[in-house]
Structure formats: structure tokens, C-alpha cells
Image (cartoon, helix red, strand yellow):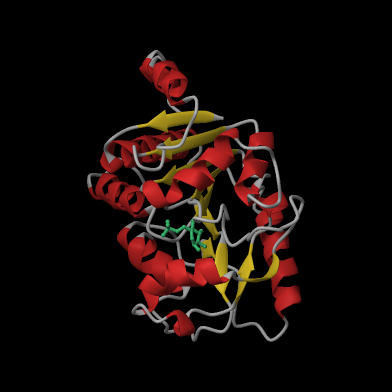
Amino acid sequence: MEVVIDRSVEVLANLAADAVEALLRRRPDAVLGLATGSSPLAVYDELARRHAQGRISFARARAFLLDEYVGLPADHPERYRTVIERELVSRVDFATDAVHGPDGSADDLPAACARYEEAIAASGGVDLQILGIGTDGHVAFNEPGSSLASRTRVKTLTDQTRQDNARFFGGDVEAVPHHVLTQGLGTIREARHLVLLASGRAKAEAVHQLVEGPVSAMWPATVLQHHPHVSVLLDEGAAGRLQLAPYYRQTWASKPDWQGL
Ligand code: GLP
């Protein structure tokens, strides 16, 4: 696990965008894993900027979302498929039907989850997965207690996550759905490169557990410790509880630029 700590969220977003750009140059038909939430927004802004400059094209790429609320109507502004359309897809040049999300409106949710797993597998798997982390250590919507081997399925959100996400629903926690579809931890672990971004003091304990805690379903993100290629990009607030922060800083500072993430 590589930990990068920087004061500037823009610097971190640039690093993530560099990794996406390098991947798309190497493999224009790469499969990207997209996350919603506020953490990746600066990355999407940077990717849109680079696309506008003619530096990168998504024309042959495909993408899969991590998760989706159950039951939000198709035109709801906080439906994750709508959010990613607004924040990234509409600003770059993905082909029609190249971006997929779990179908939170399906009549048969378990069947929709199984179809989603099949679609990811049929694409050849995710090359680079962008991730955030919840204050309770969730990744995607894998709440504490999630099986570390889980696949895409229905989950129930904790009160903490519903409260955290209420800001996207006009501050009304009752408007946040209780149920979601989410890629499982076993699904996410199969992506070839995981790039996790976190900022702010509220994430410090979850980040400490992710990087330095024992692997445990109580802190679902800790499963990433089993993955061979994880980049954890943190601002000073999110890095605030790391015991080995001086070591991570020194390691990053002495890494040759050409290596990238
Ligand atoms: C949400 C999403 C996650 C996201 C997390 C953190 O619930 N399902 O994919 O990583 O919470 O969100 P934020 O980046 O807004 O703090």
C-alpha cells in the first residue's frame, strides 16, 4: 500500500488523473471504476480539463460505478448514475452505453446484482478503480460487518452513513434511502489498481484503520491491505492519525517521478 500525503487536494487529484491518463495512453479501451461522493470530484474536474485540452480521450474506454441507491427515480439528482453523468461522463467523450451502474430500480434486485457482476467480468475486469472511504471505514457501500469476500448485493446503510450523506439530500436524513446496491469487497479487490482519496479530519480514524489497523470486517476498507497495488492519497487532515506518517512522506519524497502511482 502506497500512502501519499499532501496539503493540497489539487496535487492529489493530479496524481490520480496522471494514473488515469497513463492507463488510457497504454490502453485506450481500459475499464475504469468510478466512485461517487465528494472525494473524487477534483479528479473528475482534472480529467475533464485534460480532455478539453485534447490530452486524453475516453472514446474507447468503459466504466463501472461502485454502487447505487435503491429506489431513487431515474430523474433524481442524487441517483449515482445521474451524479456521475453530471460530474464526469457529460464532460468527456465516453461512447454511449460505455458507463454502467448497478440498477437500483430493478424489480429483481439480486438478479440485477448478478447481471452487474457478469458485465464487469465480461469487460475483462476493472483496470483502475477510484475509491473514497466513509467515516465508518466503508468502501463503496460495504458497511461494517460486510463479508471481506462479498460480491455485488443489496446492503442496508448505517445511520452514520445516512447522516454523512444527508448533505446531498438537502440535509434531510429521512430522504437518504436505507438500501443500496454495492459492488462487494471481493469484487472491488479484483480491480488491478485501486486509487483511494480521502480528505479532512473526519476521515482520519477510518484512514488509520485502513492503512495501519488489523484487517477486519468492522473496518471494511482494511481488506485493501490484501491488494497488491493500492494508492492512498491523503490530505493532512485525513492523514492526521497515521502512526507512520513520517515514513510514508519520506518514501514518497524519494520515489522517482517516472514511477507514478
Ligand atoms: C458514499 C459512497 C462511497 C464514498 C463515501 C465517502 O457513501 N457510497 O463510494 O466513498 O461515501 O464519501 P465522500 O467522498 O463524500 O466523503
Residue 225, position as x, y percentages in the image: 64, 35
Q: Is residue 29 visible?
A: no
The answer to whether residue 256 of the structure is visible from this angle is: yes
Question: Which residue occupies 50% across, 34% down?
Answer: 231
Q: Residue at x 37, y 40 (%)?
A: 17
Report whether 15 appears left or right of 128.
Answer: left
| Rendered position, 89 above or below 213 | below
Q: Residue at x 69, y 86 (%)?
A: 107
The residue lying toward the viewer, choosing from 234 and 17, is 234
Q: How far across and down, in percent of the image, does residue 259 sit?
A: 44, 20
Q: Residue at x 29, y 52 (%)?
A: 45
Q: Is residue 133 left or right of residue 191?
A: left
Where residue 10 sits, quadrant-wise, is: top left
Q: Position of residue 95 (x, y in %)?
A: 45, 61
Q: Image check: 234 left or right of 100?
A: left
Q: Position of residue 56 (x, y in %)?
A: 34, 43
Q: Nearer the viewer, residue 244 or 54?
A: 244
Q: Is residue 18 depicted above or below 111 in this figure? A: above
